[in-house]
Image (spheres, helix red, strand yellow):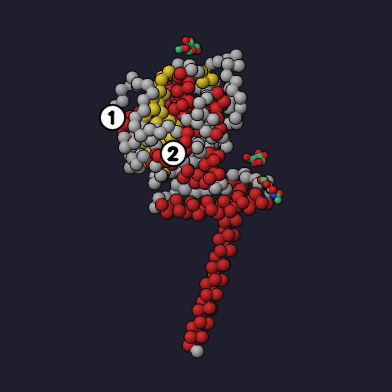
């Protein structure tokens, strides 16, 4: 009799728990539905049919879990939240916004393509922002084209030219996507180093944007078909490794912006602030961006110009903590040392 009562009690408790649990599940799903509706509105999303919408909702629910985990990992930081990429799985996101991992150079030591004549001091300024010095063009949006390798190269060329001549010009990313050969494959992916090498070795002019408009789609190369070949040539560049030597990276940044290869997988959910606890292993490198400055102080950080539009991060920029090679920022850094 006692046992039977206990059994009953257990069943009742079990049922209550189950019911409570179901209610919790239903309210959670409702809440997620509401968040999804808000997301659709905010980012002006539209899906071809109900099947597609429900797939995207599932991805969105998974993203909410990932965001929770990311926040836990960085001790409740507010760097992660819903972004325009929250209806994609990490695989879909990597496929559309990150460059295949095989596309970077593999080198753990300093890799010099040409010698820099500039002396690099070890004392860094407390902050520098090349945006304030008229050396940075507007934030680009690569859309679904894996163009980061070309964008970051073109941007350090734009910056080097602006610093040398005082004239800031927007240059053609499309020319790089269409024309640079070797291991570079347009929107599929490529390498900043191999692009810079191609430019120097072949004496190629990076044309002004208006003479070779960028559409972020694979096209046939139309170089030498425009009457106006105005643009910029790269005379020399460096490829460097700053692992455990971020002080030197700061020194370089005080002379000009640089391009860095990074792991941007956690950026799928980056909503602003200074990123830390970002996986920095070499095998995770999958993106490239121009570092346009840094700020020292209590929470020192690099300022990275990303290429996912101005709705992303801090008006298109990402702040990455200085000191732990966060996101793998020191693995491969490219510096354009002379342009004409
Ligand atoms: C929203 O999306 C629709 C169709 O996708 C497009 O026509 C419209 O211009 C977009 N509006 C905004 C504000 O982006
Ligand atoms: C919904 O759209 C997808 C394409 O994104 C298509 O493959 C699928 O067949 C469509 N489903 C229905 C029910 O129309
Ligand atoms: C590179 O091209 C320029 C014309 O744009 C030409 O004057 C120069 O001689 C060329 N340099 C080499 C090394 O071919």
On the question of residue 109 being in view, the answer is yes
Q: Position of residue 12 (x, y in %)?
A: 53, 78
N-terminal label among 1 and 2: 1
> Dot 2 lies on which element?
loop
Q: Residue 138 or 90: which is nearer the viewer?
A: 90
- Answer left or right for 143 relative to 103: right
Q: Residue at x 52, y 25 (%)?
A: 181
Q: Residue at x 39, y 46 (%)?
A: 277
User: Which residue position is annotated with label 1?
Assistant: 122
Label 1 CB less than 8 angstroms from ligand 3: no
Label 2 CB less than 8 angstroms from ligand 2: no
> Dot 1 lies on which element?
loop
Q: Residue at x 52, y 46 (%)?
A: 90
- Please, is residue 324 above or below residue 149 in the view? below
* Label annotation for residue 236: none
Q: Position of residue 72 (x, y in %)?
A: 42, 54
Residue 188 lies in quadrant = top right
Cα distance in 3D space between marks 1 and 2: 27 Å
Label 2 crowd bin: few (<14), some (14–19), many (20+), radius 10 Å: many
Residue 250 lies in quadrant = top left
* Label annotation for residue 285: 2
- The C terminus lies in which quarter of the figure? top left
């Amino acid at each position: 009799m006692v046992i039977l009562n206990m059994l009953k009690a257990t069943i009742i408790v079990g049922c209550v728990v189950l019911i409570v649990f179901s209610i919790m599940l239903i309210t959670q799903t409702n809440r997620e539905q509401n968040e999804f509706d808000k997301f659709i509105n905010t980012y002006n999303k539209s899906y071809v049919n109900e099947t597609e919408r429900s797939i995207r909702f599932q991805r969105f629910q998974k993203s909410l879990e990932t965001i929770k985990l990311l926040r836990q990992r960085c001790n409740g930081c507010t760097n992660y939240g819903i972004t325009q990429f929250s209806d994609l799985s990490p695989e879909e996101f990597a496929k559309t916004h990150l460059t295949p991992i095989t596309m970077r150079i593999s080198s753990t030591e300093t890799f010099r393509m040409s010698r820099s004549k500039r002396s690099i001091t070890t004392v860094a300024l407390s902050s520098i922002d090349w945006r304030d010095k008229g050396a940075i063009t507007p934030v680009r949006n690569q859309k679904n084209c894996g163009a980061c390798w070309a964008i970051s190269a073109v941007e350090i060329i734009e910056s080097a030219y602006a610093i040398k001549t005082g004239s800031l010009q927007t240059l053609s990313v499309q020319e790089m996507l269409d024309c640079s050969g070797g291991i570079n494959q347009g929107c599929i992916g490529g390498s900043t180093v191999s692009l810079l090498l191609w430019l120097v070795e072949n004496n190629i002019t990076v044309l002004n944007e208006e003479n070779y408009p960028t559409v972020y789609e694979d096209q046939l190369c139309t170089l030498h078909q425009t009457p106006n070949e105005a643009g910029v040539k790269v005379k020399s560049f460096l490829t460097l490794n700053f692992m455990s030597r971020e002080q030197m990276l700061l020194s370089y940044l005080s002379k000009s912006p640089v391009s860095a290869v990074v792991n941007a997988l956690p950026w799928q959910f980056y909503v602003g602030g200074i990123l830390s606890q970002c996986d920095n292993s070499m095998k995770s490198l999958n993106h490239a961006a121009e570092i346009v400055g840094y700020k020292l102080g209590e929470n020192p950080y690099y300022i990275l110009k990303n290429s996912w539009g101005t709705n992303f991060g801090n008006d298109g920029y990402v702040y990455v903590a200085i000191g732990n090679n966060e996101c793998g920022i020191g693995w491969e850094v490219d510096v354009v040392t002379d342009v004409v």
